Amino acid sequence: MNRRDFIKHLGIGVAIPLLPSLLPRALWANQKINQMPKRLAFVYSPNGKVMNHWTPKTFGRNFELPQTLRPFTSLKNQIQVLSGLAHLKAFANGDGAGDHARANATFLTGCQARKTAGPNIKIGISIDQVIANKIGSQTLLPSMELSCDTKRTSGSCDSGYSCAYQFNLSWKSETTPMPPESNPKLAYQRLFNDPFGEKNSKTAKLKMSLLEEASKETKSFKNKLSTSDKNKLDEYLESLYSIEMRISKIDQMQGSLPKDQLVFDMPENFQDHIRLMMDIMVVAFKADATRVISFMLAHEGSDRSFPNIGVSEAHHQLSHHKGNADNITALQKIDLFYSEQMAYFLEKMQGIKEENGSLLDNSMVIYGCGIADGDSHSHRDLPIILAGGKNCGLQTGRHVQYPKDTPMTNLYLSLAEKMGVSLEKFGDSTEKIKDQ
């Protein structure tokens, strides 16, 4: 019997953290305490970066964090800034305009998107789904796909490319996207194994708090837990409580709005939305409900403005800065905002202790974009951070320069191997990155 089957045997219908004292001694030994579950997350931000404020000036371990990366100061020894990686399949290669659609579509696939606005879309399976197909049976959910944008799988968006390319990071097959969930309530409910039931309706209210459900189910075995495991469980339930309270506030706000103004349980504030989704990601990893997550902060070409940080102009328009100093200053503010959200996520993971370190030590997190400078639409020398993974064999706390045009998919081969999935080839890969 494996851990997942044992949890089912107990009759627990909710995702709970890994608790050594709950499991039989032989089963816990089989869990290989020094090889805790490994997790992998991909977080995408759109429209490129102001690269001279992103890229450190020196390489190796004695690098200084530039302005855009300052929010990672306390996490410097937990991240790698990777330079030189490219997605050459995101260039036109004879297909003309459409760099934003290609950047989004290529980021996790390493393939060239077929230029079409019709139903005959074609790109390639994404690396998260390749890994989920191999290890997803070990968890409640094979993978999670999240976004802060609404779903779109059809229509024309960028220069003759289907919206499916621009609004989806994850692809189940070369013709089937995995639409991400942007509603925090529905993303949260997925952790409680109700993907098709009444609780998953956008209009249905929760009949009972999922926290209350979790508390009832865990009460029967809580007295069997060690003090350490009781503290872990209490901490976990508190995190669920925090998420539920924030979702409840959104529900209350929605109840006071006219029907034509409802936004389907979305937080009004963009930062609140991002952080709520990130907290759900942390809970999902902590409870080992899934080990593979992709999160699109916003789709490529996003015209979102950022009034909370003093930027009223649309992000996409600003990214075509033409060297204008005011536009670049506004872009720097947006880049810094996204870095702050990522730092929040990584700090949350770093603060959760597991048997052999932190949740972040047992996780690998890619943060980046399929475009470097937004004005030139370059897909070379992409802005990429690889965070965490000390217990996965990663060398953290450094700025790495790879040879020019090293395929991003080479990195994916290496990360897949560390997740227990050996691949000879993926997308446009040429070889595994060995110094990782």
Image (tube, grey):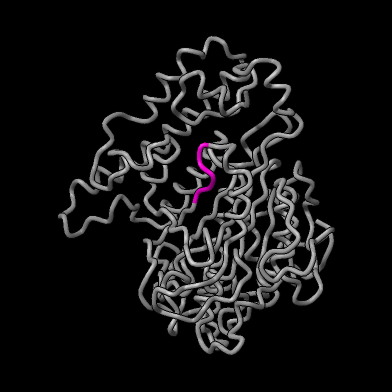
Question: Where residue 33 appears, x then y in whole percent?
Answer: 73, 28
* In the displayed structure image, the side of residue 304 where residue 109 appears, left or right: right
- Asked if residue 69 can be seen in this view, the reply is yes
| Residue lying at the far top of the rendered structure | 223
Question: Where residue 210 appears, x then y in whole percent?
Answer: 37, 30
- Residue at position x 73%, y 22% from top? 29
Most foreground residue, 47 or 199:
199
- Residue at position x 48%, y 79% from top? 318
Answer whether residue 416 is magenta in the image. Answer: no
Most foreground residue, 49 or 89:
89
- Residue at position x 23%, y 55% from top? 262
- Asked if residue 170 can be seen in this view, the reply is no
Which range of residues does the magenta coloring cover?
140-144
Relative to residue 162, is residue 209 depicted above or below?
above
Most foreground residue, 215 or 70:
215
Answer with the quarter of the image where residue 138 lies.
Answer: top right
